[in-house]
Structure formats: C-alpha cells, structure tokens
Image (tube, helix red, strand yellow):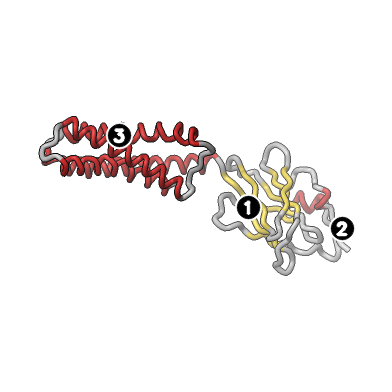
C-alpha cells in the first residue's frame, strides 16, 4: 500500500512537471494557455502510464475493456485536473520563483501522502487486531490438530484447531484484557494463557504431559481463571 501511494505521488507530480519542461523547450516564449494545457496533458499522460504499469506487473486486473475504461477515466481526470492546477500556479508565479514552487509543492504533496498512509495504517490497526500462536507438545514437537478455545471475554467461546505446524490464528476485533486461550492437547495438561495480540512472530505455547497421578478437573481450570464451561476435549484423566 505504501509503495503504491509513493508511485501515485511520483506520477501525479512528475507528469505536470514533465509537461512544463517540454512546453518550455518547444516554445521559446510559450503562452499561458499553452503552459496550462501541456501541464494538464502531462498529468493525463502520467495517469495512462501508471495504469499501464499496474496492468503490466499484474497489480491490477479488469474482466473486460469496458471495466478498465470506466475505472481509468476518473484517474486520468484526477491527474489532468492536478496538472491543470500546477499549470495555473506556474503561469501565476514569476519565473524566478517557479523552481522553488515546484520543490515546495513536491514536499507538501509528499508529506500529505505520508500522513495519509500513516492515518490509514493506524485506522486499520486499531479496527482489527489478531492473535496467533504455535502449540508445542512434550519434547518440543508441533502439536498438529490440537483444539484451541478462544474466550474473547464476551459472546460464545470459539474453537480453533492448529495446523500441521502447530499454528493457530484468529481475528480479534478489539483489544480485550479479559480474553483467554485454553489449549487442550490430547495427553497434555490443559494450558490457559492470555492471547498475545499483533505479535510479529507467533508466540510458543509448550504443553506439559498429564501427571501420572491426579486428574484434570474443574478446580484445576478454575485456578487458572477459566470461568466458562469446560470443553470435553479438556476433560482428560491421567493413567
């Protein structure tokens, strides 16, 4: 997402600047309308080039040509309008100040793009968080097919299952200090832990074997703050 926004910023500002450079080379003393028109044309050409590159590198896809045209026209219009504004600013500014104007515009648009990306990323991060983990059985081997129960602190308890690598994942709509994980590996002592949200690497959960003497009973789970009903996968007697 950040890369695409940077590319958009470069093309949106680079097109009108290229148009301005070309009109100044083509005409010794260009008229104002020529400068404005070439800047707008440069913006439109930059939009077409950007769309072509997105299609070439398969970053965008359309089922029909009509869909492509309908999606491309607003983008081309936006870039052309931005080029028109740049052209108007260029003809309204003394020639000695134009270089500084372009540099200032570059900085302003760049900062605006970065702020927008940061706000967008923060919004996504706050709106949706997730939990994950890797369950390891006695001996440190991945515990495939292990039931993992997620109590979000509200609603029903959700049942998850680890994959062949012992990994489980689940979305967590909002941060909740009351959320708990109950991991019940067959032949292992049930483990209760608070979930680790948005970890860069999934945390490891090591399961201990069931003691030779004693039973996994309700008091054991209550001592670990599990207040929901005990799943049948966790009611395992020792031998």
In the picture of the structure, the residue carrying the numbered disc 1 is 132
Q: Is residue 85 left or right of residue 186?
A: left
Question: Which badge, 1 or 3, comes first in the chain's sequence?
Answer: 3
Name the residue rendered at 21%, 31% in the picture: 88
- The residue lying furthest to the front in this view is 65
In the picture of the structure, the residue carrying the numbered disc 2 is 237
Q: Secondary structure at mark 1?
A: strand
Q: Secondary structure at mark 2?
A: loop
Name the residue rendered at 40%, 44% in the picture: 5
Question: Which badge, 2 or 1, comes first in the chain's sequence?
Answer: 1
C-alpha gap between disc 1 and disc 3: 44 Å
Residues marked 3 and 2 touching at CB (< 8 Å): no
Residues marked 1 and 3 touching at CB (< 8 Å): no
Q: Give the quadrant of residue 109.
A: top left
| Nearer the camera: disc 3 or disc 2 | 3
Q: Secondary structure at mark 3?
A: helix
C-alpha gap between disc 3 and disc 2: 72 Å
Question: Can you give x and y, in whole percent of width and height, for residue 183 in the image?
Answer: 73, 54
Q: Is residue 31 left or right of residue 120?
A: left
Q: Is residue 36 left or right of residue 138?
A: left
How many C-alpha atoms fall within 10 Å of the one at disc 3: few (<14), some, or many (≥20)? many
Question: Which badge, 3 or 2, comes first in the chain's sequence?
Answer: 3
Q: Quadrant of the C terminus?
A: bottom right
Q: Which is nearer the eye, 99 or 176? A: 99
Name the residue rendered at 82%, 56% in the picture: 216
Work out whether 70 lies above or below 148. Answer: above
């Amino acid at each position: 997402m950040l890369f695409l926004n940077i590319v958009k910023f470069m093309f949106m500002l680079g097109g009108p600047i290229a148009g301005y450079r070309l009109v100044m080379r083509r005409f010794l003393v260009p008229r104002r309308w020529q400068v404005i028109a070439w800047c707008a044309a440069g913006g439109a050409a930059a939009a077409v080039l950007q769309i072509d590159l997105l299609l070439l590198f398969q970053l965008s896809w359309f089922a029909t040509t009509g869909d492509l045209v309908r999606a491309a026209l607003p983008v081309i219009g936006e870039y052309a309008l931005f080029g028109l504004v740049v052209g108007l600013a260029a003809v309204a500014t003394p020639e000695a100040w134009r270089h500084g104007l372009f540099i200032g515009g570059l900085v302003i648009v760049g900062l605006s793009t970065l702020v927008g990306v940061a706000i967008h990323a923060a919004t996504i991060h706050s709106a949706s968080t997730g939990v994950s983990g890797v369950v390891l059985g006695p001996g440190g081997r991945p515990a495939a097919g292990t039931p993992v129960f997620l109590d979000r602190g509200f609603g029903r308890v959700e049942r998850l299952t680890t994959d062949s690598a012992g990994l489980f994942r689940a979305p967590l709509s909002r941060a909740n200090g009351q959320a708990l994980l109950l991991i019940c590996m067959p032949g292992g002592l049930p483990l209760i832990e608070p979930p680790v949200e948005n970890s860069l690497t999934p945390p490891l959960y090591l399961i201990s074997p069931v003691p030779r003497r004693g039973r996994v009973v309700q008091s054991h789970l209550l001592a670990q703050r599990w207040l929901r009903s005990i799943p049948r996968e966790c009611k395992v007697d020792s031998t």
